Image (cartoon, coloured by chain):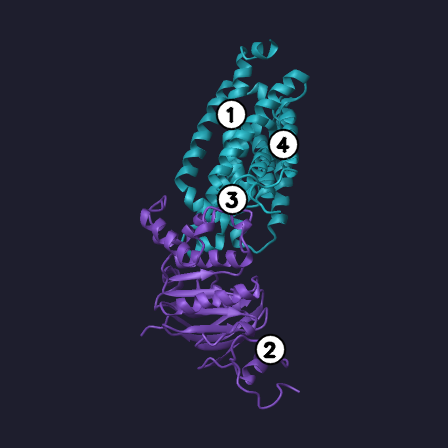
Amino acid sequence: MMEAGILGYSFFQNALLAAVFASIVCGIIGSYVVVKNMVSISGGISHAAFGGVGLGYLAGVNPITGAFAFTILVALGIGILKEKTSQNLDTLVGAVWAAGMAIGIVCISLVPGYAPDLFGYLFGNILLVPASDLALMGGVSVVIVAVVALLFTQLQAVTFDEEYARVMNLPVTRLSLVLLVLIAITVVMLIRVVGIILVIALLTLPAATARKFTTRLWSMMVVSVLLGLVFSTGGLWLSYLLDIPSGATIILLATIGFAVSLFIPRPGSSE
Amino acid sequence: MIPAVDVKEVSYRQNGNLILDQVSLSVHQGDMYAIIGPNGGGKTTLLKIILGLLPATRGEVRIFGNPPEIGRCQAGYVPQFRTFDFRYPITVREMVLSGRLSHLHGATRRYRTEDRKVTDEVLDQLDLARFSERSLLNLSGGEQQRVILARALVGRPRLLVLDEPTVYVDTPSEVQFFDILQDLKRSMTILLVSHDIGVISTHVTKVACLNQTLHTHDTNEITEDMIAATYHCPVDLIAHGLPHRVLKEHQGRVGP
């Protein structure tokens, strides 16, 4: 029984725990990203995170800490610019996307010596998540669940119909910024698991699959979390079995799940 | 009596273009006031300024004597269709319930028993109770529009503001929708805009025409002069097959 044997290794237990945390935050935050059509903004934010990794290296602090600080600032910047200008948001996101990567590359080139784990940040490796990062992931998950639980009604109103939320005198601008910051910390937390390039898939695919089968936001979140668990643990197991990279396997499994869901009719629809 | 809506010399510029030019209007309590005009004439812009969603470049707006941000708590708003994504996972009841949000306070704004009770009453009143657990996606255009109206009504507004309320619904639903409005007119002030002069029924107490500037008339009649000044082209007033005659008998053809 090879599968049972692998569970005995602490690195595999860590990987499973990381998969659970990742599924929880992806299911919750990814649902907002999907229903509010924020996929490209989230892509921009996640690539900007690479700039934070580079700045962290350059400053000599933990690159993940650098990524948290920088990515939150970028998310707030996008939110404020979106509010202030009538500029096409797509252009803004494209600029942030590329500039973030560029900052990262420049910073890393300025650090003397060999940057050890670049590939790890871009593509992630769930099997190498250290225990200290696991504690961080757990903490971030708790914060995200708590904030969403407290602001659920208002975040639903703002993501459903922003203009009406304004008429209802909700603090729409502040709530939108809160949502962007939640996306930012989710993305950074997932960098170790699937990496900057693949994070957008883990954020959106379970939620996009779940939307089709649910009529309430909270049930969409629950189904997304469950799908995320299936994809991430299934992908982990498959990657071990076939000896292929774990992050990419998880994403491919999620993509197959999403593709299959496209052919399943929406329940309760008359078509 | 304080007017329900008081617009004083409001102008609005967007990217240098003058969208509204010194528009003034008073909607008195109990009025059912219709603003008609062509697409791009500034009707939606005016409603958004009234509700405080856009800042007027010049001029002033009052709702029941208060600035928009305060006054709009006494207003129900039926925006133009499709300002939101119909695939959003939300049930009819949840969406209607969100119309209570302006009555809630505190950091979390949890709904109270009272909010749920009012919501169920309004769902019953608009014959929507049987759809309450469904998603918006599986409803007809007329039903969707009644849901949007229900959301505006659960706040128990004194003023109802409707933007192109029947543009996406079929004719029977449109007739039904105006029957509902006629009912509501007894208990609240109604302000609506439309690009289609055919929707103006005898229920309307006042009509104004808006195309950058506002032409008012103190009755519910639309005069040929108003139409000519607003649309800048001859309009065949009779061809719409109106459910009720709101136009004067013609003395001659409009325009050349």
Disc 4 with disc 3 on a shared chain: no
Q: Colour of chain B?
A: purple
For label 3, the SS is loop
Circle 3 residue: B89
Above-or-below relation of B167 to B34: above
Residue A231 location, quadrant: top right
Classed neighbour count for the residue bearing mark 3: other residues with Cα under 10 Å, few (<14), some (14–19), many (≥20): many
The residue closer to the viewer here, B131 or A88, is B131
Q: CA distance from mark 2 to mark 4?
A: 54 Å
Q: Are marks 4 and 3 in contact (CB under 8 Å)?
A: no
Check disc 2 and give the amino acid type.
Answer: Tyr
Give the residue type at disc 3: Pro
Q: Left of A84 or right of it: where is B218? A: left
Q: Considering only order in the chain, which callout, 3 or 2, is on the residue closer to the N terminus?
A: 3
Asked whether disc 2 touches disc 4, contact meaning CB atoms under 8 Å apart, the reply is no
Q: Depth check: A83 or B3 in front?
A: B3
Residues at marks 2 and 3, CA–CA distance in whole angstroms: 41 Å
Tell me, yes or no, whether dots 2 and 1 are on the same chain.
Answer: no
Q: Residue at x 61, y 19 (%)?
A: A237
Instruction: Calculate the distance from the C-alpha at mark 3 to the C-alpha at mark 1.
Output: 24 Å
Where does label 4 land, which residue? A257
Residue highlighted by disc 1: A20
Question: According to the colouring, which chain is cyan?
Answer: A
Type of amino acid under label 4: Gly
Query: Is residue B4 at all visible to an observer of this figure?
Result: yes
x, y (%) of residue A186? Answer: 52, 34
Chain ID of residue with mark 1:
A
